[in-house]
Amino acid sequence: MCGIVGSLQRNGVLDPESLRQMTAALRHRGPERSGIHQWTTGDCQISLGHTRLKILDLSDAASQPMGNDDGSVWLVFNGEIYNFRELRASLEQRGMRFRTGSDTEVLLRLYEVEGPRCVERLEGMFAFAVWDGGQRRLLLARDRVGKKPLFYCWSPTVFAFGSEIKALLRHPAIVPAVDRQSLPAFFLYGYVPTPDTIYQGIQQLPPGHTLVLDSAGQARLSPYWDLRPSGPSGPIPTPAHAAARVRDLLTAAVRRRLVSDVPVGAMLSGGLDSSIVVGIMSRLCREPVRTFSIGFSGDPRFDETAYARLAARRFGTRHTEFTVEPSAVELVERLVWHHDGPFADSSAIPTYLLCRLTREHVTVALNGDGGDELFAGYLRFYAAVLSERVPAWVPRAAHRMLGSLPPIGGPRGLVRRAQKFAASASLPFSERFSRWNAVFYEDLPALLPWSDTRQGNGRSAPEPLWRLEPYWSQCRGASGLSQLLFLNLKTYLLDDLLVKMDRCSMAHALEARSPFLDRELLEYVFGLPDEMKLRRGHTKVILRRAFADLVPREILTRDKMGFGVPLQRWFKTDLRDYLRDLLLAPGARLRGYVDQDYVRRLCEAHVAGAADYSARLWTLLTFEVWLRQLPTWSTAPEEAAVSAPGLG
């Protein structure tokens, strides 16, 4: 795993020191070696930088930027190509010779033979850039699901790209600025949907796409892969056959992700998905699997370590645990820096700490990411499908009855879930999806009074819903569940879960691999009928059947808990002063973007116990921290220097 950066400049040059600074901004992604390469052809200067985390072929010969034999093609690459051995064998049969044992060189040689279409043959997680001197073009490519990030910024004379935005911000021609038009989407979803970002002029390459830029500045963005959300297209397999096929495909996906020249372990939450991955690993590995989990002090509703220990005993792993205390929020400045901006997912706190713990023992870790998105593991999917079958008057009546009840049991309790269901069930399908996942929704106009957050037809659907229209148009005609799974893959998984895992793992130079996001498994499961994923309130139906003999029954039959943190309690107790000092200070930066009186009311109502606004407050908190960091964005906060006022 690595960090990549580069630029193509016409009628100008990027000085070597600036390129070194851009590359150095990604040192946490690859702390073991870095390299830069620059050259000029015609009126173009090409600059490439790379930071390396050694996973395959640990020799310096496999370092980057890597050029071909005559220096006409140069590559910088972040990720892993899981089928590199098969690709190498086929290239050797065509007369190709190799000087390293790396997947990087396989990718370079494959490009020499097949050009930009080489990306279609890759199985893995990747983001890379190739400069082809013979064709005078720059190729950028990103993996099919978006596991590895790739951002770019374009001006009339400069095209710059990098694994993280912080690297782009060290380019002398790029100045960080807030894109106000993206704020409604950010506060609605908790992220800005791809391809946009919260920065003016900076975008990200969509998953499953290539971008080809020639030396004259002409660009072509092209998709090379996508899922078909229309459901079964051929004969429907029997449940027994489908379960066997799922088991074979996931086992093969895990086996591919065990290839490494450095130690490999697994993140074990105690949930179904990570337990299945660890169970498969235990059968494929000769030595006991190293597993790692995290829990929370004083709040069993957010602690799955008992189930993780149960799985660890079943599979005979070497297990290590870590406990999170409220002071973990002291990491907020560092987390915002690694995320390159504000983020709504507070589970980044335990994810960051779990990755730090894991990296003390291994360099590569498998996880269960993608299982819920693939097999319909969220109860909100069932709620959305169920709402299609309920007469419209039922949820309206329920909403009136439930609206005044206190959220007994917290944000995950039955009352809160029933309230969310009743509030969303009568909305159009596209709005229902966003309402269920929203951070701010009905109150978005109150938070952002300057923005146009309502549709012109009088309905209360926020304008950012329009950003999802291209995805809805792709899956119209599919079943309701298929639409939800497709949209979730294109939004929440891509812009929240995968971002969180990439930034938190790479903050510690840990490579995280996700077997559930294997292409073959994705394509097969997306083609299965709905009832094999979700049936009568039971989630992951075919997955549970496929691994019923492997996973402990207590884990196989338990409800999903989720990887959250007890923010509701923290913000009322240990972190109350920290929250107020940051959000309600006279000099708070967010005053220039949100209604400060409304923010104050949220804080006061939450602390008084009148409502649970923890998700909203966390989102505002990270937004304020990000705004404060903007003037010195290129400098990472030192871990030892990070503090949170009021924690003592």
Image (cartoon, grey):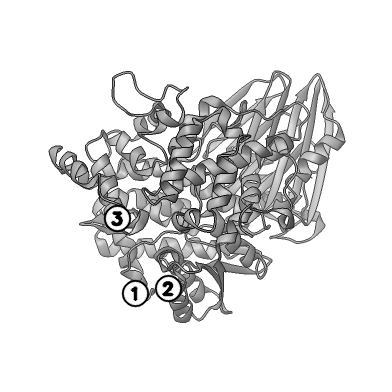
Determine the CA span between mark 3 and mark 1. 20 Å
Secondary structure, mark 3, is: loop
Quadrant of the rendered structure where residue 71 is? top right
Along the line of sight, which residue is nearer the eye, 391 or 443? 443
Of the numbered discs 2 and 1, the one sitting upstream in the chain is 2
Residue at the spot 53% in from the left edge and 32% down from the top edge: 195
Q: Which mark lies nearer to you, 3 or 1?
A: 1
Position of residue 613 measured from the top left corner of the image (x, y, whole percent): 42, 46
Crowd rating for badge 1 (residues with CA inside 10 Å; few <14, some 14–19, many 20+): few
Position of residue 45 measured from the top left corner of the image (x, y, whole percent): 81, 27
The amino acid sitting under disc 1 is: Glu
Residue at the spot 73% in from the left edge and 60% down from the top edge: 57
In the rendered image, the vertical position of residue 194 relative to residue 154, given as above or below:
below
In the rendered image, the vertical position of residue 304 relative to residue 81, given as above or below:
below
Quadrant of the rendered structure where residue 456 is? top left
| Residue named by callout 3 | 533
Determine the CA span between mark 2 and mark 3. 23 Å
Along the line of sight, which residue is nearer the eye, 6 or 235? 6
Task: Tell me if residue 143 can be seen.
Answer: no
Of the numbered discs 3 and 1, the one sitting upstream in the chain is 3
Determine the CA span between mark 2 and mark 1. 8 Å
In the drawing, does residue 519 fall left or right of residue 69? left
Along the line of sight, which residue is nearer the eye, 146 or 285? 146
| Residue named by callout 1 | 554
| Residue named by callout 2 | 307
In the drawing, does residue 162 fall left or right of residue 179? right
The N terminus lies in quadrant: bottom right
Secondary structure, mark 2, is: helix
In the drawing, does residue 76 fall left or right of residue 331? right
- Pointers 2 and 1 in contact (C-beta within 8 Å): yes
Task: Tell me if residue 554 can be seen.
Answer: yes
Position of residue 210 measured from the top left corner of the image (x, y, whole percent): 58, 34
